[in-house]
Image (cartoon, helix red, strand yellow):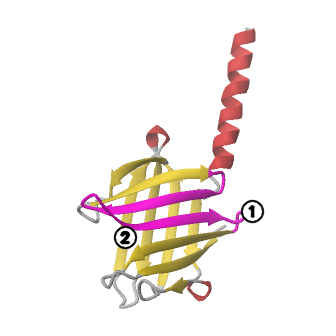
Amino acid sequence: MRSVIVLMVLLASAAAAQTKADSWIGTWTLNVQKSTYGASPAPKSGVSRLVPADGGRTRVTQDQVTADGTKRHIEAVALFDGKDYDVPALPGVTYAFTRVNDSIYVLIAKEKGVVTSTTLTVVSPDGNTRTSTTTAVDAQGKTVANIAVYDRQR
């Protein structure tokens, strides 16, 4: 009986830690006015969703209306383990998510095995704002950055 209680306490602690560790879980709306785009034209709008998926993975989706009005939907299901996961809407592209701590993760995007961008995402201490800073190298070999600021939807 004592081992069952200990197991229950450990499982509850793990669940609480998992909830805290996933501060980016939820739906986020791009705040275009607070964002800056140096690597590409600013999109007209964007909604990002991170939701739990089976096997401890996270489903990450991005719905966006680009600067020219094109609608895009990008989705990946991955663990935050630094390994490459296919992005079905973008053939040849993989995303690798790495948890840094409870409020920060890194996303490395690759195309055909070559790193194309690195994104550092930070959730504010109050949990209401998420800032994703993406760096890439443009066609001229210059390092460029986008800073996308998202507001949590409640």
Q: Residues within 10 Å of mark 2 (few under 14, many from 20)?
A: some
Image coordinates for residue 65, horizontal then vertical, percent:
41, 82
The quadrant where residue 1 appears: top right
Residue at x 62% of width, y 64% of height: 122
Seen from the viewer's position, the closer of residues 121 and 11 is 121
Residue that extends furthest to the front in the rendered view of this protein? 141
In the rendered structure, which amino acid carries the disc numbered 2? Answer: His
Q: Is residue 66 above or below residue 101?
A: below
| Residue pictured at 66% horizontal, 28% vertical | 11
Majority secondary structure of the magenta segment? strand
Magenta stretch containing residue 123, yes or no? yes
Question: Which residue in the structure is indicated by mark 1?
Answer: 125
Q: Nearer the viewer, residue 31 or 71?
A: 31
Residue 35, given in percent of the width and then of the height, sits at 57, 83
> Which type of secondary structure does the marked residue at label 2 adopt?
strand
Could you say whether the residue bearing mark 1 is in a helix, strand or loop?
loop
Residue 22, horizontal then vertical, whole percent: 61, 51
Of marks 2 and 1, the one in the foreground: 1
Instruction: Write down the region rendered in magenta.
Output: 101-128
Question: Looking at the picture, which amino acid does disc 1 mark?
Answer: Pro
Check if mark 2's residue and mark 1's residue have beta carbons within 8 Å.
no
90 to 76, vertically: above or below? below
Left or right of 4 on screen, residue 119: left
Residue extending farthest bottom: 68
In the displayed structure image, the side of residue 72 where residue 34 appears, left or right: right
Question: Was residue 134 drawn as part of the magenta stretch in this picture?
Answer: no
The disc label shown at residue 105, or none: none
Task: Identify the image quadrant of residue 87.
Answer: bottom left
Q: Residue at (61%, 58%) from the top-left corner?
A: 104
Which circle's residue, 2 or 1, is located before the other in the chain?
2
Residue visible at 46% across and 73% down in the picture: 135
Residue indicated by mark 2: 73
